[in-house]
Amino acid sequence: MAEAHQAVAFQFTVTPEGVDFRLSREALKHIYLSGINSWKKRLIRIKNGILRGVYPGSPTSWLVIVMATVGSSYCKVDISMGLVYCIQRYLPERCSHYETPQSRALLSMAIFSTGVWITGIFLFRQTLKLLLSYHGWMFEMHGKTSHATKIWAICVRLLSSRRPMLYSFQTSLPKLPVPCVSATVQRYLESVRPLLEDEEYYRMETLAKEFQEKTAPRLQKYLVFKSWWATNYVSDWWEEYIYLRGRSPLMVNSNYYVMDLVLVKNTEVQAARLGNVVHAMIMYRRKLDREEIKPVMALGIVPMCSYQMERMFNTTRIPGNETDVLQHLAESRHVAVYHKGRFFKVWLYEGSRLLKPRDLEMQFQRILDDPSPPQPGEERLAALTAGGRVEWAQARQAFFSSGKNKAALETIERAAFFVSLDEESHCYNPDDEASLSLYGKALLHGNCYNRWFDKSFTLISFKNGLLGLNTEHAWADAPIIGHLWEFVLGTDTFHLGYTETGHCLGNPNPQLILPQRLQWDLPEQCQAAIESSYQVAKALADDVELYCFQFLPFGKGLIKKCRTSPDAFVQIALQLAHFRDKGKFCLTYEASMTRMFREGRTETVRSCTSESTAFVQAMVNGSHMKEDLRDLFRKASEKHQNMYRLAMTGAGIDRHLFCLYVVSKYLSVSSPFLAEVLSEPWRLSTSQIPQSQIRMFDPDQYPNHVGAGGGFGPVADDGYGVSYMIAGESTMFFHVSSKFSSSETNAQRFGNHIRQALLDIADLFQVPKTDS
């Protein structure tokens, strides 16, 4: 086979005359090009490191300062106020006979100019950091911007006007502040007041007061010290204790899914769709490596932290007995592919050249056409990543530490990402309500062994060309993978395109090396461990009820006519729906982001407030006038928006209490208050799905080019998980999850309550509705 010969750099044969070497020029050429490509990347990283390190300065600005200093000297003007002369005096004596007084003067002026340049960069950065610490703009009414905020916006624009790279603002972002204990405790008590009876509330108030006066001051000192020392006082502990130390299965409990465009279809050729999308993903990775992606900016002014993007590719979660580890590689030139129980390795490059979409299509089609059967135990191998973490860690140590199993596992774990070629088809049919839910279930857990849940993300391809993602949560939050997905879908649709027959553009190279089958040697004990993990995962997957639906009557456009934020509108509707569903209120979690701070991730907004419960009770009571209900709704909406802003600006409740709890454990300090707070179940966990982070096309011109968002499993066994995407001016998507094993929950029933709650609130404002 020609491909096999090309894969070998040289061969040798021992003969009576000696050793006969035969070199493969083609293989050596690829090795040479690969080395050149590696050095290019190193040089790009060095260049980017320099440019990022001096932002908002630049080599050009340094040259301008040098020229100004030299020019003023020739004009007999000493702008250095004698500093150049002082530098010249302290320079070492002649090191060479070529040195002249003129060269010493030029060197002194260059040193002075460099000092001025570095000082200017430092002052600019500190000024920008100070400006970015101002968050008053978030609390101002829409359309009523103060003069101070206008001046602030002008200053921020001036200091960040030079085109930034992805990580240019990282060192200028402020640190996440540690809130005052008294403020956090007060906000906590306020959040639980509508959920507790008087007696229970007074008990909690007593615990809180005791904690605040006796235990908290000591814990707070350690936390403040950490905030001075560390880049972010929350993020490392959050990643370790919330994600990596979790011993329950990642599938359903931690990983989440992302859907494809559901209202349009680019092609039904499975391999072709994959060819375009994988190519677009590696294009994105190249931009990421070169820092050519623009930082996400709030209002086009305030930069968001980009550090989570660093581990998007080439990242795997490695299981451990007590804690997992995130393994991130600087480089990976292949993807791992699963199809019909077999694992393959597919190269993304030929030498230093990224494979074109048509070449990738051919490679994926070769896998689809491969008739070889799975090896013993291979088909359900990935179930190990879907079961308990301890069991997977023990199996990995016992059966994958040497030989071909270790080599094959490393191929998967060192891949850029994982690709799953499914044999079933899925799509969204508006006339078939169950179609979207079945699609979501396939993405959330599949058949429990056709996803590698440890990879940073698994790209899932269905037989009819529809795609989706299953994403591991420890390395980053949903907006990060959403940024990638928007780029990929936009590039696939508007830049790469397809032929009339649905194939990728261009002609394939049939000489490419074939996809490589991974080889396994799985003994019976290993196969028993695989089967055990599969049974655990299957029981978990079978217990998940998922109800996904599109809400058609209205979207963001008409909500804004109610003079409220779309997110507050939906959150209050969720409170009304939950009360109608269970007849009671519950602790509600809404994720907000803290990426305006360096290495910020998320904070919790406690959406069940006294104001929202007052509105819900009035709605359920049915005896209030519409004007009174509107007034109660506006108060609830304003409260929610204010809490969201506080969470985004570092004044949240839960991350502070979480970190105080971690410190208490390190110090072996017992706190009944913290223990109770951290054990409270979130029976309604919600999240709004981000969108339009990248403007790759005009949504008004292409209104059907919207994804359906994504979802996650329920956080509590007797609770609901709800994600929603306000997909445009006239539609929304909801993903509701619960567990069949709970007699208290029913995802479809709750979804219907959400529908009705949205309509009932809209009716208060006499918002015109279309038939759903």
Image: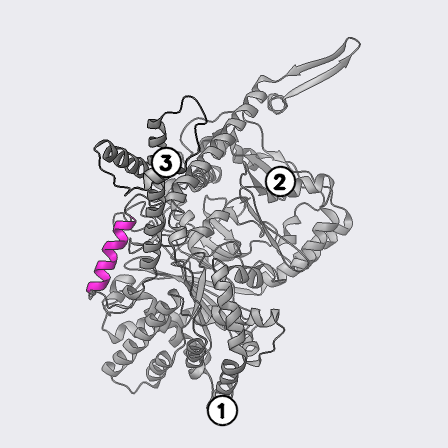
Name the mark on residue 310. none
Query: Picture coordinates of residue 359 (x, y %)?
Result: 48, 30
The quadrant of the rendering that contains the C terminus is: bottom left
SS label for mark 1: helix
SS label for mark 3: helix
In this view, the residue farthest toward the bottom is 199
SS label for mark 2: helix
Give the mark, 3 or 2, whose residue is nearer the N terminus.
3
Query: Picture coordinates of residue 412 (x, y %)?
Result: 61, 43
Mark 2 is surrounded, within 10 Å at the Cα level, by few (under 14), some (14 to 19) or many (20 or more) other residues, namely: some
Is residue 243 at least partly visible in the picture?
yes
Residues marked 3 and 1 touching at CB (< 8 Å): no
Amino acid carrying mark 3 in the image: Gln
Name the mark on residue 199. 1
- Rendered position, 30 above or below 295: above
C-alpha span from label 3 to label 1:
78 Å
Q: Which residue is mark 3?
A: 88
Left or right: where does residue 590 sit relative to residue 399? left
Give the mark, 2 or 1, whose residue is nearer the N terminus.
1
Q: Nearer the viewer, residue 167 or 641?
A: 167
**Residue 427 colored magenta?**
no
Mark 3 or 2: the one toward you: 3
Q: Which residues are magenta?
A: 147-160
Q: Which residue is mark 2?
A: 411
Mark 3 or 1: the one toward you: 3
Residues marked 3 and 2 touching at CB (< 8 Å): no
Q: Residue at x 31, y 47 (%)?
A: 695
Query: Picture coordinates of residue 2 (x, y %)?
Result: 60, 21
The quadrant of the rendering that contains the N terminus is: top right
Q: Nearer the viewer, residue 464 or 246?
A: 246
Left or right: where does residue 659 sit relative to residue 290? right
